[in-house]
Amino acid sequence: MKYELPNLNYAQDALAPHISATTLEFHHGKHHLAYVTNLNKLIAGSYLEGSPLETIIKESGGPIFNNAAQVWNHTFYFESLSPKGGGEPGGKLAEAICQEFGSFASFKEKFSTAAVSIFGSGWAWLVKNEDNKLGIVQTSNAENPIRSNLTPLLTCDVWEHAYYLDYQNRRADYVDHFFALVDWAKVEQRFLA
């Protein structure tokens, strides 16, 4: 079984003006595709061939881990976005955010700070632990919270290829616009799973 580049759930220009079609063309169509292609080459004929991405992420290191995690991270990121996203979450997720962070505004500020302050390339994550408590974590490069037994709920990609064509060095502007696209229904679905 070969991994394939997942299709986007929206048209390439659907996230504009927050994320341009040009950025999606490069980010999804070139960077994400390269991770898929590299992973397939690296695991061909190995005991990991045909394994779920989560297994590869937990059991590998080096280039195999980097490419598997980046396939997983990018798929998760793109699935977290919607042209009809934004606003605030509702239901049980909203309750959990208020319980853990005091308010949605406080959560958004803490998450944004985590995303903007990552040195170099990486990811900011909203996660839940085994006790269903929420947290915000930063990971560098391809790192993924599932290696720490955390359940990812939302991520913001702060590798420069995610935003540089649209925002240049203004990472904070990109993160602010990211919140206009978050599919909170999808995030709550992950929280309740």
Image: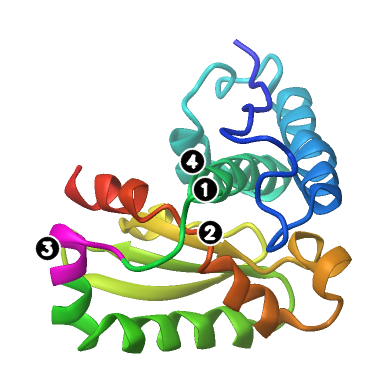
Three-letter code for the amino acid on which mark 3 is drawn: Asp
Disc on the earlier residue, 4 or 2: 4
Q: How is the image coloured?
A: rainbow
Disc on the earlier residue, 2 or 3: 3
Q: Which residue is mark 2?
A: 181
Highlighted magenta segment, given as a residue range? 89-95
- Nearer to us: label 4 or label 1: 1
Q: Which residue is mark 1?
A: 82
Q: Which residue is mark 4?
A: 59
- Disc 3, SS: loop
With 128 as the anchor, is 53 left or right in this view? right
The picture places residue 127, in percent across and down from the top left corner, at: 33, 63
Q: Is the residue marked by circle 3 packed among few (<14), some (14-19), or many (20+) residues within 10 Å?
A: few
Three-letter code for the amino acid on which mark 4 is drawn: Glu
Q: Based on the picture, tell me whether residue 94 belongs to the magenta stretch.
A: yes
Q: Which residue is mark 3?
A: 131
Look at the magenta stretch and give its main secondary structure. helix
